[in-house]
Structure formats: structure tokens, C-alpha cells
Image: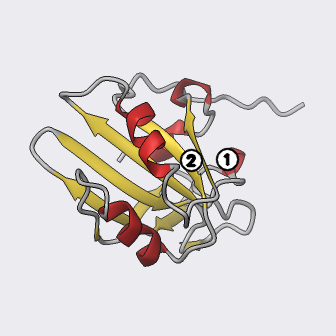
């Protein structure tokens, strides 16, 4: 019997996550989110995540960054992957088309407030604040 060991990370999970279901193109969804007063998402380089087994994934993202907060709109479906098995950033959340990763040093429970604002956007079919602690592949979000 083959034994699998999983490395437990002790990195602080100082971010919140919102899952978004939308058939809109990435740029169109970002435009709608940018209509909210506190956001200014712009296209950033793809995020490249390299694993120890030479697996490499690329994730398309838009970013809004200031001194006290970071916001990433991540496409859950990968741009490229050299593995035929996993085609999602978080395969356990493959029902979501996009993930909105929120980090703020000044606001607690910011995701609930943002999620309420997202529900008013017609291009978004569904959005949900996700408990990051319950995600098995949360290490994929540590960048």
C-alpha cells in the first residue's frame, strides 16, 4: 500500500474569498466590479505556480492593490497546466468561474460587504463567501 504524506503549511491565511458564477468574459466582469466605488481592477501578469513535482499552472488575474489592501479577481479555470488531471486553480470549487481574493488590513469581514454589492451586478449569476479554512487546496492561493 502506497502511503501519501501531505505537508501542512503554517502560513497565515490573512485573506477572504468569494466564489463567483458568471458566464461573462473576464474583462467584462472586471468592468462591472470596477463600477463599485472601491475597486479599480486592472489586468496583471498571469500568476505562475510551480510545484515540487515540476507541475506548473498559470492563472489569469486582475489586480487592485493599495497600501492597506489587495484584491485579485482570479479565473478558476487555468490558462495553462502541464497536468491533464487538474484544470482548475481550486478543483474542489470548480462550480465557480471566478474567485475574488480580498486582503485588507483595515476592514474585518470585508467579504460579506463586498458580496452584498456583487449581488447587484446583473452579470453575476451567483456569489458566495467561502470559508478559506475548509478548502483543501488553499495553498494554491498563497502568492
- Residue closest to the eye, 37 or 58: 37
The N terminus, quarter of image: top right
Q: Position of residue 143 (x, y in %)?
A: 35, 48
Quarter of the figure with residue 60: bottom left
**Residue neighbourhood size for the residue with mark 2, other residues' Cα within 10 Å, grouped as few (<14), some (14–19), many (≥20):** many
Q: Position of residue 59 (x, y in %)?
A: 47, 65
Secondary structure state at the residue bearing disc 2: strand
Residue tagged 1: 93
Mark 1–mark 2 Cα distance, whole angstroms, equals 8 Å
Establish if 114 lies above or below 59.
Answer: above
The residue at the point 53 percent across, 37 percent down is: 138
Residue tagged 2: 19
The residue at the point 64 percent across, 58 percent down is: 125
Give the colouring mode of the picture: secondary structure
Q: Position of residue 137 (x, y in %)?
A: 59, 40
Q: In the rendered structure, which disc, 1 or 2, sits on the residue that comes first in sequence?
A: 2
Amino acid at each position: 500500500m502506497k502511503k501519501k504524506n501531505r505537508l501542512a503549511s503554517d502560513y497565515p491565511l490573512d485573506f477572504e474569498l468569494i466564489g463567483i458564477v458568471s458566464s461573462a468574459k473576464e474583462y467584462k466582469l472586471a468592468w462591472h466590479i470596477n463600477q463599485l466605488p472601491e475597486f479599480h481592477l486592472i489586468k496583471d501578469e498571469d500568476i505562475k505556480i510551480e510545484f515540487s513535482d515540476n507541475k506548473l499552472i498559470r492563472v489569469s488575474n486582475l489586480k487592485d492593490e493599495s497600501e492597506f489592501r489587495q484584491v485579485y479577481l482570479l479565473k478558476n479555470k487555468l490558462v495553462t497546466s502541464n497536468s491533464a488531471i487538474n484544470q482548475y486553480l481550486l478543483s474542489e470549487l470548480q462550480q465557480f468561474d471566478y474567485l475574488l481574493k480580498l486582503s485588507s488590513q483595515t476592514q474585518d469581514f470585508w467579504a460579506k460587504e463586498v458580496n452584498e454589492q456583487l449581488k447587484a451586478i446583473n452579470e453575476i449569476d451567483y456569489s458566495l463567501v467561502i470559508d478559506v479554512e475548509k478548502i483543501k487546496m488553499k495553498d494554491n492561493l498563497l502568492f
